[in-house]
Image (spheres, coloured by chain):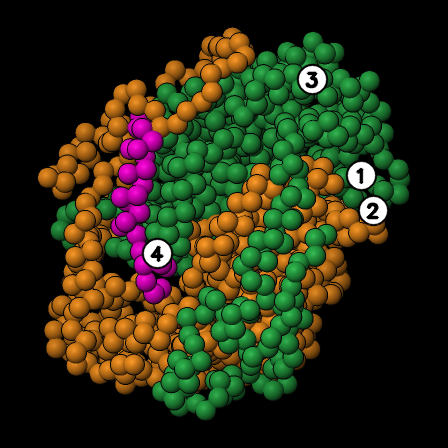
Chain colours: A green, B orange
Amino acid sequence: MAKAGTMPGTGTGSGGNDIHGGGRYLSLGPADRQAMLEVVGASTIDELFASIPASVRFADELPLEDALAEVDLLRDLEAMSVATAGHRGLLSFQGAGCYPHYVPTHVDALIQRQEFMTAYTPYQAEVGQGTLQSIFEFQSLVCALTEMEVCNASMYDGGSSVAEAVLMARRLQRRGGRVLWSEGLHPGYRAVAETYATHLDVDFELVPVGEDGRTQTAEIDDDVLAVIVQQPNFFGVMEDLTGLGSRVAESKAKFVVASAEPLAFALARPPGRSGADIVVGELQSFGNSTNFGGPLVGFMACRDRDKRNLPGRLVGRTVDADGKPGFVLTLATREQHIRRARATSNICTNEALCALASCIAMCSFGREGLRELASINLAKATFARGKLEESGFRSVYGAGHFNEFVIELDVPAQQAGAAAADEGLSTDSVPAGMAEVIRRCAAEGVIPGVPLGRFRSNGSESGGGVWAGRANRDRQLLVCVTELHRSSDILRLAEALTEATR
Amino acid sequence: MSVGGPEGTGHSGALSNRSQQGQLKQEPLIFERGGAGRVGFSLPALDVPAVDAADVWGAEQVRDTLDGFPEVSEVDVVRHFTRISQHNFGIETGVHPLGSCTMKYNPKVHERVARLRGFASAHPYAPLETMQGVLWVMQRLERALSAITGLPFISLQPAAGAQGELTGVMMIAAYHASRGEARRKVLIPDSAHGTNPATAAACGLEPVEIASNERGTVDLDSLEAAMDDNVAALMLTNPNTLGLFEEQIDRIAEIVHRSGGQIYCDGANLNAILGKARPGDFGVDVFHINLHKTFTTPHGGGGPGCGPVAVAEHLEAFRPRPVVVERDDGRLDLQSDRPLSIGQVHTFYGNFAMMVRAYTYIRAHGPHGLRQVSEDAVLAANYLKARLADHYELAYDRPCMHEVVFSDRRQKQHGVTALDICKRLMDYGFHPPTVYFPLVVPGALMIEPTETVSLQELDEFADAMVAIAVESREDPELVRQAPHSTFHRRLDEVAAARYPVLRWVPDLGASSASSNNSDNS
C-alpha cells in the first residue's frame, strides 16, 4: 500500500483554520467564533456542549490519521486508483448486471452543475423546478422504453427494486404467498429480495431455465403472489415475455419483469406490451460508470391502476398560482414522511443524480440513436459468440441473446482447496480451474467475463439455491460485449481464452 | 457585523433575486424540443457484420419504433438541461438551513477523486487481486467510521440512511432470534423521523410511540412503562430532531439494556458530535451514518446517498454479506460465507463512489478538523437561536446542538404559517428550513446552518427572518402570497395529486406544447 507523505498534526485547539490542517471548508475564522460566542452569551465553546453528560463526553483525540492537504490526498487516492484493473487498461468483458458503456462527456458535465449536484430533494417546488422537470422527463422516458404507465423517481438499485416489487405484489393482493422466480433472475437481485422478505409471509421458488436458456414453464397455483423473470435474463438470453405473460395472466399472480440491461428494449418488444404488471431493474447502463457496483439507478414502473401502491417519490405536472405549468412531488401520502409506519416503503433518499445521468443519456441517444446503440451491442456480441465458437468454445444456450452470452470451458469443475472454500473467500470461491483461466487471461491484459461459479449458495436461500443445477456452472463464463469493444478486442479475447485453456 | 433588528433589512434580497431571475424562461419539455433525425451523440462505425434482431430473436420479439423518445442534438441537450438547472437552488447558490439534512458545502476535490479511472471503471465482479485499491478505500473508511462512532464494526453496504435503518433493525431482530427470543415491539420517540416507524414496520415489527417530556427529550417514565421483554429495540435519534442531546442517555441505555433490548441510534445528527461524543460510548448498539449528510457527499436533488451501519461487537456476525476482510498475507478480500448474516441489502457492495468521497472528506479534516466542524456547526445554530429568539417562538428554550427549532406560533396570530415563512425566505435568496417537522412542535421551523455558512451569511439569514417576522405583523398578505421573486409562484399540489399527470404522452404532446409556448411568447 502506498504511504502518504503526511504532515504531522499541528493541533491548534480543536483544529481552527490551520492551513496545514482540515480548516479549508470551515466558513468561520477565530475572530468570528469569538464574536459569535459573545452574542450567544457563552464564554467557551464547551458551554454549548454542556448537555452531553460528562460520563459520555469524548475528551480524547479521535484515533484518526492527521489531516491531509489536497495535493497529498490526491497523491494517496491516485495510488489506490492505480491499484485497480480499470486503471491499468485491462480489457474487460464483464457485465452481469453492471455494464461498461460509453458515457458521453456532456452527460457527466451536466450532472456536475451545482444546481443539480448539490440541490436538496425538491420538496420546495418553487426552488426545485430543475430537478422536478428532469424527473418528470425521466419518468416519461422509462415509461416509453418499457411501455408502462407510471414510473417512480428511482430506487437504490436493481436488487432493492425487485425486493420492493415483491412487497408491492403482496400489498396489491393483501396476502402472503409464494413467489416464483426464474433462475435467470440476477442472483444479487434474488439475494436482496430474500433479505427484505425475511420477516414476511413470502416464500420463493426457483424456476429453472431450459436448454435454450429461457425460463421453463411452471404451475402457477392460487397461492402464487408473483412470477418474476428478467429480460434479457442473467445469462443474456431473450425470454419469451409474451408467452410467459399470457400464462401469468391466467392466474392470480402479478407478472413482474426485471431488467438489468433495458437497452435491449430499444429493439425488443417492451414488457408493458407483454402483460407486465410491474417492471423493475437497473438503468446504470445509461450514462453511469460501473463504480465498483454503486451507486446504480434502480427503477420501478407499474400500471396506472396500481400507482397509489408504488413506493418512492413521484413527480407530477401542475400549475402555479398564475397558471404557469410546473412540477411537484405528488401522491406523497404513500411515503414515510406522511404515512410513517403505514407507508408503502421506508425509502427516502433515492439515486436522483444517477437517474438524471440516465435521463440525459437517454435524451442524447434519442429515438433512433438508442436503437442504433442496441443494434451495435447485439452485433458485437453476436460476432464475439461466433468467434469464440470458432475457437472451440461451446456456447451454452441456443436461444437468441442480447449483449451477453454464456460459454462453457473445458476446465475442471471442482472447487478450490477445501481450506479456502471454508474461509468463504470470494476469489477462491471461483472454482480453481476457472480461476486459473482468468488469471492467465488477466496476465495477457484481458478479463474474459464473469465466472458463474462465483455465485454460490449461502445455504439460507428458501428458493433452493442460486442455480437449479450446480456442476456445469463452475465451468461457465458469462461474457459481455458492448459498443466499447472493437472487433480487434474481440479477437484478443478469443486468443487469450484459447491460450489460457490450452 | 450587523446584529440587526428589523430596520434596514428591506427587500434587497428580493430585488437582487428578481434581477437574476430575469434571464429565466419557461423551458419546454425535452420532448417538445428537437426535430426528426437529430442525434446527440456519436458511435464508431460498425466493424463487425450487422445483425437483424428479428433473425436472432424472432420477428414477434422485435419492436419497430421507440415512440416517446426525443430527437435532439448535443447542443439541444446541453442547453435544455442547463436552462432547467437554473430553476434549481444549489448549495453554491446559497444557504440551505435544512434541519436534520446537514446541507453543507460539497468539496470540489471529491468529484475529481471519485472519477479517478481506477475507481469509476472498477467492476464489482472483477478478480479481487485487481481490486485492491477499491477494497483499501473501503477498509480505511470502515476504520475511520469506527473511530468516529466508537463502535468496532461497520457495514458500508446500505445505499441510504433508510436502508441503513432497515439493515440495523434486521440485525437486531436476527440477534434476538439467535438467542431464541421473538421480540415484537420497537419503541420510537414521537420526535423521530418518519423512516423510523416505516423501517420497523418493514421488518414486521410493531412501532410503539413514546412521548417526549417538557424538555424535549425522552420521558423516562414513559420509557419505563413501555419497556418489557417483548421490546426488540429503542430507535433513538441523538442529538434528537429538536437539536437536543439526550441528557439522560445513561439512564435510557440502562433501562433498555436491563430488559434485554437494543439501542438503535439514527445518525442523521452526527454532525453535532464529531469528536465530542461517540455513540459507542453512550450505550448505542447500532448506529447508522448518512455519508450524504455529515460527510458531505452531494445530495444530488434527492440521492444517491450511502448509509453505513456501525455496530457493537455482539452484532458483528449479523452484518450484511459480503464483508471486507484482510487475509494473512495482507491482501484484502470480500468474505461471503457468513452464516449468521442477515443477507445482502445491495446488489453489489453499496454506493462505492460515495464511500470514496466520504473517505476523502475525513482525511481532509483529520481529528482536529472534524471536532472543529461540530464546534462550528453548534456555534452557528446557537448564534441563530440568539439572533431570532426575540422574533420567533422557541420550541425549547435551552442551548441547542447543531440545529434549533422554532414554531410559527407568534406569526400565526397574524395568519402567517411556517409554510408562508418558508416561501418568503425564497424572496430573500435562501432555501427554506425544514418545516412541520418534528411533529411534536406544531408549525415547526427546524434550522440547521452547518459549519459551512459564514458569519456574514448567518447575519443575512437572521436579518431576513427578522424582516419576515415584521412583515408578518405589518403586511401578512405579502408573506402569505410569497414567493414573489421566483420564476414560479406557489405550485398547486392539491391539483397535482387529484389529477395526476406523471409522464409526457406523445398523443398529448400538442396540447402541452401549446401551453408552454404561450408562456414563452
Secondary structure at numbered mark 3: helix
Q: Which one is closest to the eye, mark 2 or mark 4?
A: 4
> Residue B221 appears at what percent x and percent y?
54, 83
Q: Which one is closest to the eye, mark 1 or mark 4?
A: 4
Q: From the image, tell me which residue sits under label 1.
A: A428
Looking at the rendered image, the quarter that the N terminus of chain B falls into is bottom left
- Looking at the image, residue A36 sits to the left or right of residue A223; the answer is left
Residue at figure coordinates x 52%, y 86% from the top left: A46
Q: From the image, tell me which residue sits under label 3.
A: A494
> Residue A115 appears at what percent x and percent y?
34, 51
Secondary structure at numbered mark 4: loop
Subunit that carries the residue with mark 3:
A
Q: Is residue B369 above or below residue A30?
A: above
Q: Separation of disc 4 and disc 3 at Cα?
A: 49 Å
Say whether residue B75 is magenta.
Answer: yes
Q: From the image, tell me which residue sits under label 2.
A: A423
